[in-house]
Image (cartoon, rainbow, N blue to C red):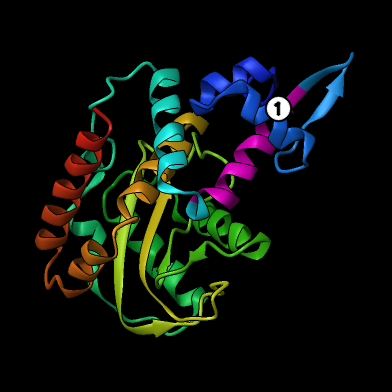
Amino acid sequence: MPYRNLTLQDLARMLGADARRLERMAAGGEIPCQKVGGQLRFNRAEITEWLQQNMATMHRDHLAEVDAGITAHREVHEEEPIVTPLLRPEAITTQLHARGKTGVLKELVALATETGLVYDDQPLLEAVQAREELCTTAVEGGIAIPHPRRPLPYDLADSVLAIARAGRGIVFGALDGKLTDLFFLTASQDDHHHLHLLARLCRMLHDEKWVEELRHAETAEEIIELMTQREQVVLAQSR
């Protein structure tokens, strides 16, 4: 039952967060919840949506907690890279040609399809377009992380990551009003990997100097090297 209700303790374990803090957030309306029989209950689908919309603006310490919590929930090793295994040169470009949001999403999906992990590109394109219509995935710093709202277990052979850099900024709906030039499209087969990947990417992107190095990388291989090194740094910070 992927979208069953979670108790406060379930959510605390999932997010690696203190239950008392989550209870205060729920009382203040900061996190979606409802009361059932006098007890707090959290709908997994609503929590997933809440995390997707808020993860990019979380403080790095909070992101580290979410990352650690999902790592434990998925029962994977705490030092296991999850971004690096998805890096493929055919899904990375430093020469994005699109000049608008629709074109960007089409090019990103085309890159993801080059990996051979996407059974059908149309459902993926429709899913990321629907997500953008709901709320932009652009964040401060000229970065966007397009992704579907829900896992795509029947449309993917495995999780996929596509990375693209535009030669000039594109209007993508960032709340700071600035243009976006770095794009990271993600899609997964299950909720937990989807959220884990978003949390890890957001942690990695919390370094302006490193992001600028990405902007100056000339090849897909250079981007892969930078991403690999950065994930190792983030993992070292968790030890």
Residue 62 in the image, given as x and y percentages of width and height: 47, 40
Q: Total of numbered circles in the picture?
A: 1
Towards the viewer: 19 or 173: 19
Quarter of the C terminus within the rendering: top left
Quarter of the N terminus within the rendering: top right
205 sits to left or right of 32: left
**Secondary structure beneath label 1:** helix
Residue 145 in the image, given as x and y percentages of width and height: 44, 58
84 sits to left or right of 36: left
Which of the 4 image quarters holds residue 188? top left
Residue 161 in the image, given as x and y percentages of width and height: 33, 50
Q: Amino acid at mark 1?
A: Glu
Write down the region rendered in magenta.
41-55
141 sits to left or right of 26: left
Residue 166 in the image, given as x and y percentages of width and height: 31, 78
Which of the 4 image quarters holds residue 107? bottom left
Towards the viewer: 121 or 68: 68
Q: Main secondary structure of the magenta part?
A: helix
Towards the viewer: 203 or 119: 203
Towards the viewer: 185 or 16: 16
Asked whether 88 falls inside the magenta stretch, the response is no
Q: Which residue is mark 1?
A: 23
Q: Residue at x 41, y 41 (%)?
A: 61
Q: How crowded is the residue under tag 1: few (<14 C-alpha within 10 Å), some, or many (20+)?
A: some
Q: Residue at x 78, y 21 (%)?
A: 40
Q: Residue at x 78, y 42 (%)?
A: 29
Residue 46 vertical placement versus 239 (above, below): below
Q: Residue at x 29, y 65 (%)?
A: 208
134 sits to left or right of 112: right
